[in-house]
Amino acid sequence: MRFSRPEADVFVPSGGDPAAALARTTHLCVIAHQDDIEINAYPAVAECHGRADRFLTGVTVTNGAGSARSGPFADFTDGQMQSVRREEQRAAARLGQYNLQIQLGHSSADAKTPGHAGVRADLDAIFGACRPQVVYLHQPLDKHDTHVAVLLRCLEALRRLPRDQRPPQVLGVEAWRGLEWLLDADKVALDADAHPDLKLPLMQVFASQIAGGKRYDTAAIGRRQANATFHDSHATDQYAELCWALDLTPLVQNDRLSVIDFAAGHIDRVRSDVVTRLGRLGA
């Protein structure tokens, strides 16, 4: 299995043929950075962990350059950080018992370039070689440019597939903007309770980020717990931890649906809900 970048990394934690592993994928997570799967798409890991009938393939599109660094990593060069992050992602794949982990190694600039030949070829190869039941991506309300760019490149690739080969469910996960503020009807609840002993170790594998100045581990757990508690004001908590996702399936089913209109529609419905409530209560 070859991709456009010579430094692309293809890793099957249990051993075996990468092409066969990709073909058996049931859950596919295509995301921007090393650690985005573990921080932002934990339910995808939990759905497949320890199962003989579910197979998670993780794909990180970019190379991890330019990340924040301090402490023991303060003096690392960009090249050293990329090497460390590549090994950390492999370690997470082993710990999480992933089916396959692919690191494409593109720069963020290339991912942000519409029509970039290497990014396009790599994503076409991945989406074309598997038939997952569910695909996890970033979502268009995110405020991180690289996340949004990777989402757009993935949607473009999915729309290039024949209609009968497109996945039946595509979800966009929280990251640099939570989704708790959306209308309940406009978001999908993902149970993050399973495998409690796995959650923190899976994120703490990424020492270059956590010891390097970003406490993603405690922040992610806190967000999930807050999502669970603040989900419903009139009911007891149904989850200990909850992740929110956006259903992106309409964008894959309908090639003519504008991503801008899709995203703005969610914002418009929140605005309408706020205005209507204030008026109903006498504002």
Image: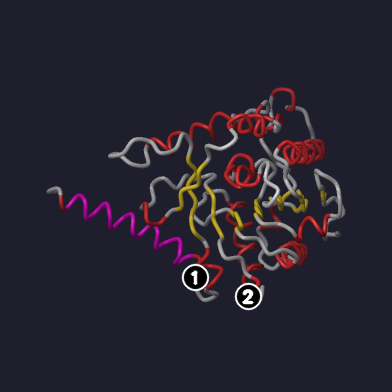
Residue reaching furthest to the left: 282
Task: Examine the rendered structure and indicate whether residue 44 appears above or below residue 119.
Answer: above
Q: Is residue 156 magenta?
A: no
Q: How is the image coloured?
A: secondary structure
Q: Horizontal and vertical percent for residue 30?
A: 66, 54
Quadrant (top left/top right/bottom left/bottom right) for the N terminus: bottom right
The image quadrant that residue 269 belongs to is bottom left
Image point (55%, 62%), residue name:
169
Marks 2 and 1, Cα distance to the nearest angstrom? Answer: 21 Å
The image quadrant that residue 171 belongs to is bottom right
Disc nearest the viewer among 2 and 1: 2
Q: Residue 258 carries which label?
A: 1
The image quadrant that residue 129 belongs to is bottom right
Residue reaching furthest to the front: 52
- Residue stretch rendered in magenta on the structure: 260-279
Image point (45%, 65%), residue name:
262
Which residue is nearer to you in this view: 171 or 47? 47
The mark nearer the N terminus, 2 or 1, is 2
Helix, strand, or loop for circle 1? loop
Kindly identify the amino acid type of the residue bearing the numbered disc 1: Ser
Image point (46%, 48%), residue name:
189
Which residue is nearer to you in this view: 5 or 14? 14
Image point (61%, 42%), residue name:
46
Q: How crowded is mark 1: few (under 14 residues within 10 Å), some or many (20 or more)?
A: few
Kindly identify the amino acid type of the residue bearing the numbered disc 2: Asp
Task: Examine the rendered structure and indicate whether residue 29 appears above or below residue 220.
Answer: below
Q: Horizontal and vertical percent for residue 187?
A: 43, 53
Q: Horizontal and vertical percent for residue 120?
A: 72, 66
Which residue is nearer to you in this view: 269 or 54? 54
Instruction: Say which residue label 2 marks.
Output: 164
Q: Residues within 10 Å of mark 2 (few under 14, many from 20)?
A: few
